[in-house]
Amino acid sequence: MKHTIEVNGLRKVFDQNAAIKDVSFFVKPGEIFGLLGPSGSGKTTTIKILTGELGQTAGDVSVLDVNSHLFGTADFRSRIGILSDNSSLYERLTVYDNLKLFCQLYDAPLEQIDVMLDEVNLKEARSKVVSKLSKGMKQRVLLAKALIHKPELVFLDEPTSALDPGNAAHIHRGLQKLNEAGTTIFITTHDMEEATALCDRVAFLDKGEVQELGSPDTLRYKYSTHAFHVETFEDERLVIENESGNADKIRELIANGEVKSIQSDNPTLGQIFLKITGKELV
């Protein structure tokens, strides 16, 4: 399999309005790929098409070498995991009994339940009724549900949006561990720190089109001015252009012990998106 996901000329129209206009990208096996953009940019629509929840208006879509017209088959669905805004739990059942049902559905061993509860930091909540859980705890149960059958490919739509920083970091470590074991991960988010920490490559989606695509480091270098930002012990903040003529100036500051910190200009993914689209990622 050359690519886990292939999308060419994707278009989706709702009532004469194009939510997705002309989107093309691919995801490599074993990659963590991020689709980034503000609310309403088309991220969720794209993930619903890739998982078979919606059909495309035009374009070619292939996932795990399966054409989009076969996305509804039991075989295809057993190979993927999904956490989306439509994911749900049985509110009257306990956390354990919810996950037991999905183990039975996917023919996964029951021992996998405690493994997943540990991964999402919910072992102590295994006997709690779902209706009594906080929004963040429910989000973590849904993530466990998406991963419990060890899918080849996982689609995660805003997976840590309801989580506090501690639990988000715990989930990030779990996803990195899962990825290291060979699982391909497709994630949508507007959290640029999350994307920078997790993703091998990202695509910026806005107005239904991909505006930029590449690794976080490549994009940050591409949009950098390459200037040096120097803070002195006198609380001066200097911006020195990265030119040979400025070498003596930097050397002098260092020699005189004036430099409190120095760093090259590397914009965040959020700053890059704002520069490209004029929009904040909120």
Image: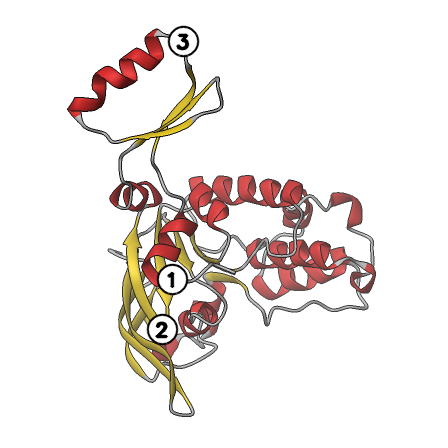
Q: Quadrant of the N terminus?
A: bottom left
Q: Which of the two residues, 77 or 233, is positioned nearer the viewer here?
A: 233
Position in image of residue 159 (x %, y %): 56, 56
SS category of the residue bearing label 2: loop
Q: Are marks 2 and 3 in contact (CB under 8 Å)?
A: no
Question: Which residue was labeled with disc 1?
Answer: 278
Q: Which of the two residues, 121 or 39, is positioned nearer the viewer here?
A: 39
Could you tell which of marks 3 and 1 lies nearer the N-terminus? 3
Left or right of 8, for residue 57: right
Q: Quadrant of residue 18?
A: bottom left
Left or right of 242, for residue 270: right
Could you tell which of marks 2 and 3 lies nearer the N-terminus? 2
Position in image of residue 192 (x %, y %): 46, 49
Question: Which residue was labeled with disc 2?
Answer: 208
Above or below, comparing residue 276 to residue 119 in the picture: below
Question: Which residue was labeled with disc 3?
Answer: 257
Position in image of residue 20 (x %, y %): 36, 76
SS category of the residue bearing label 3: loop
Tell me how far mark 3 sits from mark 1, CA to CA: 40 Å
Could you classify mark 2 by the number of other residues whose Cα lies within 10 Å: few (under 14), some (14-19), or many (20 or more)? many
Label 2 or label 3, whichever lies nearer to me, is: 3
Above or below, comparing residue 241 to residue 148 in the picture: above
Q: Amino acid at mark 1?
A: Gly
Above or below, comparing residue 56 to residue 120 in the picture: below
Tell me how far mark 1 sits from mark 2, CA to CA: 15 Å
